[in-house]
Image: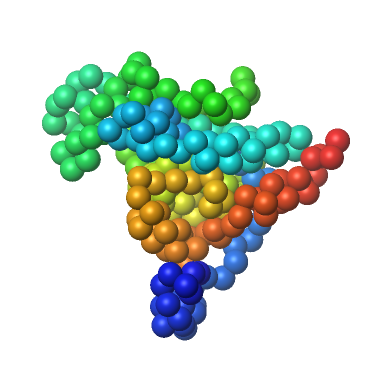
Amino acid sequence: MNDAQYGQDTERTYERAGFGAPVRRGARPAIVVVDLTRGFTEDRFPSGADLTEVVGATSALIEAGRPAGVPVVFTTIAYTAAEATGDAVTWLHKARGMRALVEGGEEVTIDPRLPRAARDHVIAKKGASAFFGTTLASLLTGLGRDTVLVCGATTSGCVRATAVDAVQWGFSVLVPRECVGDRAAGPHEANLFDIQAKYGDVIDLEDATAYLSALPGAAS
């Protein structure tokens, strides 16, 4: 919670309602990198913003999890040409800028600055949540995971939707604040506040990397 931004009255209201307790941190986390594709991380695209710092922080988090074998799942939003130009996807009537995210285009390519490895997983999706209409829940279950560190873009859209669905699927949620970004500061901060209050723990990158470094096998 952020007293300076939202005020003490807001803080007290949420505390009285019983929100904001810390989540259980499991011993078998996974990192889910939501839509850090060029169409979102580069401001030369209408749908994007300069998320260089987010990409750098997420890269550091991924590298911190490598010694312990923490699985990494990347997601990308990609539509067929028919979906992008037609009426089949209702969301595209509201978020028309997303019609540029067409399969095979550079906008849907995962940012090449991220440290992808052959063992990492990639999931294509059509909606905001990385879970909706995808195999992510069964993948995480098959990998024996109990906690999800959610990174990516945008905080107010696909990150928030993924955090909500993750906890509804039974995974504890951690969101390293340096590893998520948005097009504007207001929606970014408001959604971090809401995630912290109701769905997961919004933590610093230092805390997140320390958590990963302390996992069994991390020192070997």
Residue 96 screen position, x and y as percent: 19, 36
Answer left or right for 150 relative to 95. right
Identify the image quadrant of residue 79.
Answer: top left
Name the colour scheme. rainbow
Residue 206, compared with residue 74, is above or below; it is: below
Residue 125 screen position, x and y as percent: 37, 32
Give the residue at x 42% y 59%. Answer: 189
Answer left or right for 75 relative to 70. left
Task: Name the quarter where the C terminus is drawn.
Answer: top right
Marks counted in the figure total 0
Depth check: give the residue in front, 55 or 193: 55
Answer left or right for 65 relative to 7. right
Give the residue at x 41% y 27%. Answer: 38
Depth check: give the residue in front, 28 or 49: 49
Residue 2 screen position, x and y as percent: 49, 69
| Residue 198 in view in this figure | no
Outermost top residue: 104
Give the residue at x 59% y 57%. Answer: 203
| Residue 72 in view in this figure | yes
Identify the image quadrant of residue 217.
Answer: top right
Give the residue at x 46% y 26%. Answer: 110
Answer left or right for 146 relative to 105. right
Residue 33, compared with residue 17, is above or below; it is: above
Residue 62 screen position, x and y as percent: 63, 36
Outermost left residue: 87
